[in-house]
Image (cartoon, helix red, strand yellow):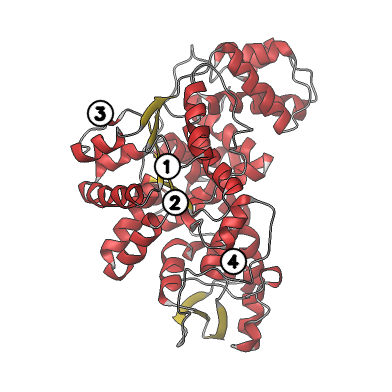
Amino acid sequence: MAAMTATNPEAAGTNAGDSGDETANRIWEQSARRLRAELADATWHTWFQGVKAVRFENGTLVLSTPNSISADRIRSNYRPMLIDAVATAAGEQVEVELITELNPEPDFFEPKPSVPKTSSAASAASARGSELPTGTLNPRYTFDAFVIGSGNRFAHAAALSVAEAPASGYNPLFIYGPAGLGKTHLLHAIGHYVLNLYPKKRVRYVTTEAMMNDFVEAIRDRSRMATFKRNIRELDILLIDDIQFLERSQELQEEFFHTFNHVHGASGQIVISSDRTPKSIATLEDRLRTRFEWGLITDVQPPEFETRLAILRKKAEADHLGHIPDEVMDFIASNIKENIRELEGALIRISAYGSLNQSPLSAEVAKSVLADILPNTKPREVTAALVLEETALMFGWEVADLCGRSRRRPLVAARQTGMYVMREMTDFSYPRIADAFGGRDHTTVMYAVDKIRREMGERHTTFEQVNELIARIRLGSDT
């Protein structure tokens, strides 16, 4: 259960006084300010803007929402975040109860005129409710930030063509290739480009697993099914990542078949990413496979040496890493060849080493710093226990702390980072990760993964911590 006040996003919670006692207003005002700072604009305006404080009694904060749809969404997707914010504001653990107003808004998905104007395309989409909460676009993933090489040139050109003229050529556009080569980047870049050219387009980016989780919730509560279908069908651009996970659910394949037909039939553009071709996705229905092959199928391949160098230089410039000697760049590009995330992570690690030790960088230093992740060293098998152990060591906690119930801020940050890394380095589902971290609710993991992913695009320290933890997990922290 969770919620939020304030129709004025710049003064979160200021209208709470209309509907609650003084304690409820005070707790909610502080909670709302924190939530407003952490949530994406689309999420705030769509789900939280109309929430109000009602009362605080017997250790329970009662909040009202404009309608049952927003209450359900907050309960299912944002409950841990809300409870954390309220507990911080109250100085103790507080129960949160959501109720629905007697006179709900007539059309929940109508644009809200009070949304402030912003310069970003994503915010423009948020203002009219067209970019849905599950699919916030990463501000780092634009076409300008994408480094083009021989391994991705055709995929980039196809993505740009689709973004410039949606649904007029390659529909669907199917991009496949191994993890870490820029498929997700291209999907986000299409979203940004479309919203810059056509601010009124309804764009949604969603991972297949997030779609699956929403679908499961809709099956459990049939009253949500209409909302689920509307959220994923009433679109101009559907950007769906990791479609290979459809093979896990025949029921979702059935639903996505109708979603594909609806969006495509209404002249909407569909862009799909996968780690393999449609023909290689086991148990995928033939009728879906043939539809995925209607448009253009293109792949991304590992970058060649010159492209790897260009990626490193752009990363150093974007993250303000200062001067990195050419011999260090050459060493990284020569030794890390298959994955762009690993390439950038190695650069961050070496830069951090030089900065923290105040020592000059060289190829020899790079070789020493990266000894545990270089290709000639055998990596460890990544298990839940290994991720927990290395997360605890890196952040100075015990595994029992990570799996416990304490909500001390530094511990919560470490726990959320561990959840994100476990998600990135394994094929574990959200519920399985939740079990590994002490049997939590899977929505807690979903929130943690989304939060860390967002912070990696906004905070350099978070990006460094994640890459350092991944490096420790691969071959150990004793090197």
Q: Name the spot of residue 253 as percent of width and height, x first.
A: 24, 46
Determine whether label 1 and label 3 are within 8 Å by CB: no
Nearer the observer, disc 1 or disc 3?
Answer: 1
Q: Nearer the viewer, residue 95 or 157?
A: 157
Q: CA distance from mark 1 to mark 3?
A: 23 Å
Q: Quadrant of residue 9?
A: bottom right
Q: What residue is disc 3 on? A: 279
Nearer the observer, disc 3 or disc 2?
Answer: 2
At 29% across and 57% down in the image, what residue appears?
216
Sort mark 1 into few (<14), some (14-19) or many (20+) by Cα contacts within 10 Å: many
Q: What residue is disc 2 on? A: 236
Q: CA distance from mark 1 to mark 2?
A: 9 Å
SS for tag 2? loop
Q: CA distance from mark 4 to mark 3?
A: 46 Å
Q: Amino acid at mark 2?
A: Asp
Q: CA distance from mark 3 to mark 2?
A: 27 Å
At 61% across and 64% down in the image, what residue appears?
35
Q: Image check: 294 left or right of 239? A: left
Determine whether label 2 and label 4 are within 8 Å by CB: no
Q: Name the spot of residue 136 as percent of width and height, x first.
A: 53, 51
Q: CA distance from mark 2 to mark 4?
A: 35 Å
Determine whether label 4 and label 1 are within 8 Å by CB: no
Mark number, residue 85 = 4
